[in-house]
Image (cartoon, grey):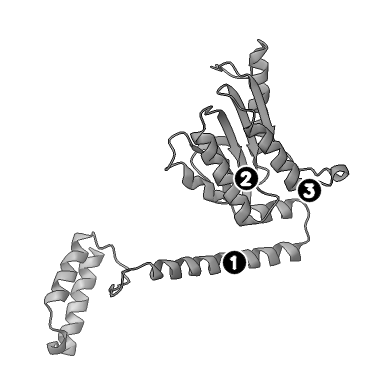
Amino acid sequence: MMITGPNMSGKSAVLRQTALIVLMAQIGCFVPAASAKIGIVDKIFTRVGASDNISSGESTFMVEMNETASIINNISERSLILLDEIGRGTSTYDGISIAWSLAEYLHYCDAKPKTLFATHYHELNELAPKFSRIKNYHISTREMKNKVIFLRKLVEGGSEHSFGIHVAKMAGMPKEIVDRANAILADLEEKAALQNNKDSLKNLPKNTNLQLSIFDTTDPMVRQIQAELDKMNVDKLTPIEALMKLSEWKRMLKG
């Protein structure tokens, strides 16, 4: 399960409660559920939280990589793996690359362990359509008047927002910092959208004729107007005829 969702929504809580429920089931305890079907689990591996190891000279990211490597080298077909934001301690592209590669490995490896993978890298949502064992889930939210309400529900499908600035505001960050962060975010998203559009245009075949359409071209009425336009000789229309034709089309579109 690839689990996305905003900060503070409960992704880590889902991982922890899953570990506790599985552990309780293994020792014969009741679990907090109306019903549960849990197989035998020989090991529960977790990579949750962020901490460094100053005495050994290891950074937060190095500790994360050491623990992740230990998990990968000791998994079995009955293992449960809980991964929380793998790759967050390094640059964005490095982190996404490591998380993506790790997810692919867990999908293809012989053990095929059950895995919950919580992440803020929304790019990882693209894995589900490509790999049969990977499913997207997210913690649902609702936005109301610039506020985010956490619904605390795990639902199917991916999420594309982290609402980090909203959480910073909740933590008491000064208003000028929050406002400036929102302005920078909007600027970055606009630049990213422009870059994506440029990349799309670059990938178009040469001599492609582009036409911007503001109408629903599947509408029969729009198709009728388009057919009339194709047959019409605009150069021979008088101004009165043109105005009358526009008035006719306007009545048609209004129904």
Q: How many marks?
A: 3
Q: Residue 17 at what x, y percent from top left?
A: 66, 27
Residue 149's disc is: 2
Q: Position of residue 206 (x, y in %)?
A: 30, 73
* Res 224 quadrant in image: bottom left
Which structural element holds mark 1?
A: helix
Residue drawn at x 51%, y 44% is 158
User: Which of 42/169 is in front?
Assistant: 42
- Amino acid carrying label 2: it is Ile
Which residue in the protein does label 1 denote? Answer: 188
**Gap in angstroms between the C-alphas marked 3 and 1:** 29 Å
Please state which of residues 109 and 120 is positioned toward the viewer in this rendering. Answer: 109
Mark 1 → mark 2, Cα distance in angstroms: 25 Å
Indicate whether 202 appears above or below 3.
below
Q: Which of the image's four quarters has the C terminus?
A: bottom left
Q: Is residue 211 left or right of residue 182?
A: left
Marks 3 and 2, Cα distance to the nearest angstrom?
35 Å
Query: Is 123 left, or right, of 31 in this rendering?
Result: left
Return the disc, 3 or 2, that comes first in the chain's sequence.
3
Assess whether mark 2 and mark 3 are in contact (beta carbons under 8 angstroms). Answer: no
